[in-house]
Structures are given as C-alpha cells and as structure tokens.
Amino acid sequence: MARKFFVGGNWKCNGTTEEVKKIVTTLNEAEVPSHDVVEVVVSPPFVFLTLVKSLLRSDFHVAAQNCWVRKGGAFTGEVSAEMLVNLGIPWVIIGHSERRALLNESNEFVGDKVAYALSQGLKVIACIGETVEQRESGSTMAVVAAQTKAIADKVTNWDNVVLAYEPVWAIGTGKVATPAQAQEVHCELRKWLNQNVGADIAASVRIIYGGSVNGANCKELAGQPDVDGFLVGGASLKPEFVDIIKSAT
Ligand code: G3H
C-alpha cells in the first residue's frame, strides 16, 4: 500500500494566543490536497493545544511536542500521555534532537517514551538524526540505526509511528540536506528496518525529513522515493507551510 504523504508543523516554543489564531486562520483558509493524499499535523506548545484543536479545520490534526515517559503522578512540570488522550490530542512528537541535546534524553529513554505513548493510544512522530560531527566522522547510519533500534527494542506495532529523520546540522540553520543526502539516509533506514524489524513494516512506515524545509526546497525533497513527507519547524509558523503541504502532489 502506498505511504500517505505526511506534513508535520512543529511550532516549538513559539507563539502568543493571537499569533496562534493567525496561523490557524491561514491553515483553515488554505486550499490543499485532500486528506486522502496528505496527512497534516501541527504541533503547538502544550498551552495552546486545546485552543488549536478547537479552531483547526477537521482534516488537520494536532500533536503535542512531548509527553512523560510513564503514567502521570508526582512529576512536576510534566504532561502525561493519558492527559493528551483525555484532551483528544491524537499525536505526540517524541525524541526531538533539541530535547535529546538540551535535556539529555537518551536513546533508551526515547524508546520507552515512544512505547508508552503508543500503549496509551497516541500516534507518535519519533525523531532521529545525527550531529555534524557524527556526519563528518562517517557515523550517520550507525547513529540513526542506534536511535531507531532503541525504539524497535520497545515497539512491536509500528502502525502508529512516523519516523522523522532530522539531521541536527540542518535544524534551524538554513542548511537543508540535499535531496540526495536525505534520500540516502531514508533508503538506508528502510533497509535497516527491513533487516531488523520486518519487510512489511519497512515498506509501510513513513520516514519524513526535517531540517530547514521551506516553500522553495520542499518540492525536490518530496520527489525522493523514500521521503514520505516533512517535519517542519520555522516555516510551519509562516504561510509558506501551505506550499509545503502542497508539495505532496
Ligand atoms: O521539528 C522540526 C525540526 O526541528 C526542523 O526545524 O525547519 O526550523 O529547521 P526547522
């Protein structure tokens, strides 16, 4: 079965109520390919999740940017998977490189989080990617394979997982991976999944690219056979996000 194109917008730690409403209005008024062709998920900060969910067109969905690794309880400042489910939030981003780097989230911790979120019924955008030092030392595949293995060790059903390959050196830098660089890693990841997880899963899991995607570079990236969509940061706050959604066709 063909993999449906997926476009995620990660708003990160940005926005006021007014700015959020403005982005949602732009999205609601946009003419984009149908939900049969492209799945669109936007990820506002926790505090705006219910507002965005209440205002956003029904063919687009929302994602949280993180959730706690286990059932909620005495974990000050955390938000549990159960709470997201309770609010009707269907998706969560887990393992973003900013959290891996700034909050020391290890591969194993990310794997545990993905498994717990899935067990509660959430769908997960699981992020992986190498640093510039790792790329320059030739260890890109070893790094992303280890990150993926930590997820595969805890997860058996991949139906609700989208894998986001986001090279750290491309995030927020304007230094986008070339289509060939993205395709190479996505293809290798699919081979890794084929050999280590299963042929059906390798064929069906969507592997999306993130890192300085914008309205100008999205079309060529989208044309790569193993690039099944995007996780967009900065450009998801701007009207050009609509052009990125349109790159699905
Ligand atoms: O989650 C999104 C990525 O971090 C990409 O961010 O598009 O601003 O480079 P960016």
Image: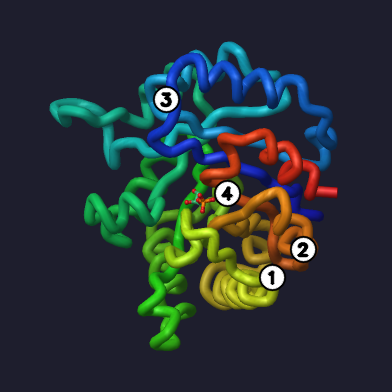
Q: Nearer the viewer, residue 17 or 114?
A: 17
CA gap between label 3 and label 4 equals: 20 Å
Q: Residues within 10 Å of mark 3 (few under 14, many from 20)?
A: many
Q: Is residue 136 above or below residue 192?
A: below
Q: Residue 182's quadrant in the figure?
A: bottom right
**What residue is drawn where x is 25% and y is 28%?**
72
SS assignment at label 4:
strand
Q: Which residue is mark 1?
A: 179
Type of amino acid under label 4 = Leu
What secondary structure is found at the residue carrying circle 2?
Answer: helix
Given the image, on which type of amino acid does mark 3 rest? Leu
Going by the numbered disc 2, the residue's amino acid type is Glu
How far apart are the two marked residues, 3 and 2, measured between alpha carbons? 35 Å
Residue 224 locus on image (x, y percent): 75, 67
In the rendered image, which residue does mark 3 sit on?
84
Mark 2 or mark 4, earlier in chain: 2
Looking at the rendered image, the disc whose residue lies closer to the viewer, 3 or 2, is 2
- Tell which circle, 3 or 2, labels the residue nearer the N-terminal end: 3
Q: Circle 4 is placed at which residue position?
A: 231
Residue 182 at least partly seen? yes
- Coloring basis for residues: rainbow
The residue that label 2 is drawn on is: 220
Compare marks 2 and 1 and give the one earlier in the sequence: 1
